[in-house]
Amino acid sequence: MLTAKQLNQYADVLIWGVKTARTKQYKRNDIVLVHYDLPAIKLAEILQEKLLGLGINPVLRLGPTVPMEKIFYKKSNQNQLVFQAPGTKELFESLNGAIYLYAPESLTHLKDIDPKRIAKALIARKPFRDILSRREEIGSFGWTLCTLPTLELAKQARLSFEEYTRQIATACYLDESNPVKAWNSIYNRAQTIKKWLNSMKVNWYHIESKNIDLRITPGKQRRWIGISGHNIPSFELFLSPDWRGTEGTYFANQPSFRSGNYVKGVRLEFKKGSVNKIKAEKGEEFTIKQLAMDTGAKRVGEFSLTDRRFSKIDRFMANTLFDENFGGPSGNCHIAVGSSYSDTYRGNPAELTHEKKKHLGLNDSALHWDLVNTEEKMVTAHLFSGKKVIIYEKGEFKYQ
């Protein structure tokens, strides 16, 4: 269990994150949602006190318990699956920020639920996510999230609870004398690397490892972003490519848990931008159904790289937030199948209409599933000039 001091430090870092993630400054009487799982209640209480001290109005929402979630998906009829409580739209249209505290007590409780039922509920909630995305694009909304250690997470990661807790504290710099100062330092170092990446006029990227041979096309008006306060921890730099230029093979050697299902060894083959072949060592049927959720589910919405010099994460954590930021000996890359991030648009995201996003090849989907590879790899930028630049090798960006 995190100590009282570590929880207090965690709250300070999360407030730094939600402030940094929003382009406009917060002001008194702004509204910030604190959405938390039951084991995270102590951190939620600390955040409530700190937000009130800043003159902000915290809205506290406890997530469903494991039995509640199972009952919902087992007992709901078709109308109940898509039901949204009155006032939800109005709340989301008024939110200025959100902090999500993830502390699951089970990762596999939905394994016997038909993925189509889960997908239907997700699709019904997508309009609310779209509201927050639009508010973020105009600078009126910022968000961050974190993970709290639980016995279930430790068990699925095959670590002791103490080891799992130490990984979280180390990864989030909670044992530093001034964690916020440490995060500001990482933020500033990342700014330099992003400036270097965004100075290149790239036609396409070639990702090569033992099991990956993939071509990613950034597309027009794209920029690398990341380490922006959105996730604690977050060490990844990423962009949302033009999905239409994706070709080749991608392999996720990191397992993942999704909607109560354990998935391992996912291999995807892309042709003309979409997945045309799906294989998985475990969870293949579930993976196939997830990528059939909607038209955009078989397309790439994100391409990401993590520099091992930033990340202290060196264990599988059974949690995407940590696993997509794995450092270890070789860093990691990941792709996300599904929705794109509009803030990777180089212009003003507020000007992005649905038609313009479609024109630019920014993907739209109710799905966003990060699939992680930690193999040693090389990423080469093929510039429009014909020049080739190795941007990432042996787990590090090659910027000097």
Image: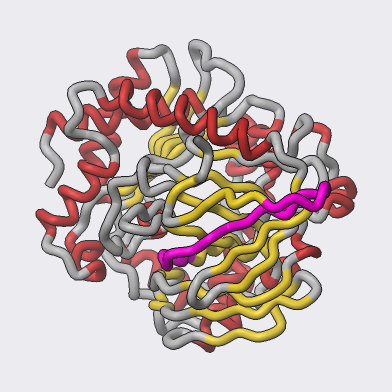
Q: Is residue 386 left or right of residue 157?
A: right
Question: Which quarter of the figure has residue 361?
Answer: bottom right
Can residue 168 be seen at all in this image of the molecule? yes
Q: Is residue 363 left or right of residue 256?
A: right
User: Which residue, as the protein is rendered here, is positioned at the far front?
Assistant: 387
Residue 354 at x, y percent in the picture: 84, 48
User: Considering only vertical position in the picture, is 326 above or below 399?
Assistant: below
Q: Nearest the camera: 328 or 346? A: 328
Residue at image x 89%, y 52%? 359
69 drawn magenta = no
Is residue 71 among the parts visible in the rendering? no
Color style of the picture: secondary structure
Q: Which region of the structure is painted magenta?
A: 372-388
Residue at screen point 37% across, 21% down = 51
Q: Nearer the viewer, residue 157 or 120?
A: 157
Q: Is residue 210 left or right of residue 80?
A: left
Place residue 99 in its image quadrant: top left
Q: Does 112 appear above or below 366?
A: below
